[in-house]
Image: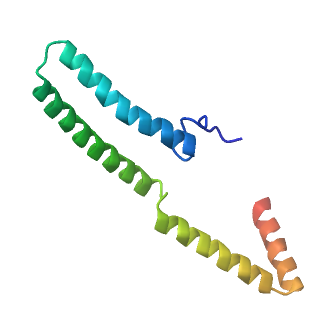
Amino acid sequence: EEKRLPWFFDPGTYGGVIVLTIFLIVAPLALKSALEASGMDGNQVGVALSGVFVIGGSLLWAFSYVFRVFSKDMTYSTQLKQYEDAVIQKRFEELEDDEVDALLGEIERESAL
């Protein structure tokens, strides 16, 4: 069984999207308040937080893109794989019974090696 995140942390669910959105709104505000309470000027805090979130978001996006490229988990690769599977399935359905038996026999011989 595949391990999955709880629904409220999984960004692929509505609950995960809502929790992530709330976190991305609350975290910068809390950090801004904490930095201002520590004595930093409000303008400096705003500039610093904006820079951190823009640069951090850009780096996060770039790393996620590179990860998806290397894991071949991109839309084109997924669609190509689904198309190839559908073509193979269609060709298999068009085979005669004796051709299917011969193919299955060949697969069994290869798997026995």
Q: Quadrant of the C terminus?
A: bottom right
Which color scheme does this rendered protein use? rainbow
Q: Nearer the viewer, residue 1 or 41?
A: 41
Q: Nearer the viewer, residue 43 or 71?
A: 43
Q: Position of residue 28 (x, y in %)?
A: 30, 30
- Please identify the quarter of the rendering in which residue 13 is found: top right
- Please identify the quarter of the rendering in which residue 104 is found: bottom right
Q: Position of residue 88 (x, y in %)?
A: 68, 77
- Please identify the quarter of the rendering in which residue 91 is found: bottom right
Describe residue 110's horizontal placement relative to residue 67 as left or right.
right
Q: Nearer the viewer, residue 39 or 112?
A: 39
Q: Nearer the viewer, residue 107 or 39?
A: 39
Q: Is residue 89 above or below residue 55?
A: below
Q: How many marks?
A: 0
Describe residue 39's horizontal placement relative to residue 33 as left or right.
left
Q: Position of residue 3 (x, y in %)?
A: 64, 37
Describe residue 76's horizontal placement relative to residue 24 as left or right.
right
Q: Quadrant of the N terminus?
A: top right
Q: Residue at x 11, y 27 (%)?
A: 44
Q: Residue at x 25, y 20 (%)?
A: 33
Q: Residue furthest top?
A: 38
Q: Is residue 14 above or below residue 101?
A: above
Q: Residue at x 84, y 72 (%)?
A: 105
Q: Position of residue 18 (x, y in %)?
A: 49, 40
Q: Residue at x 48, y 64 (%)?
A: 75
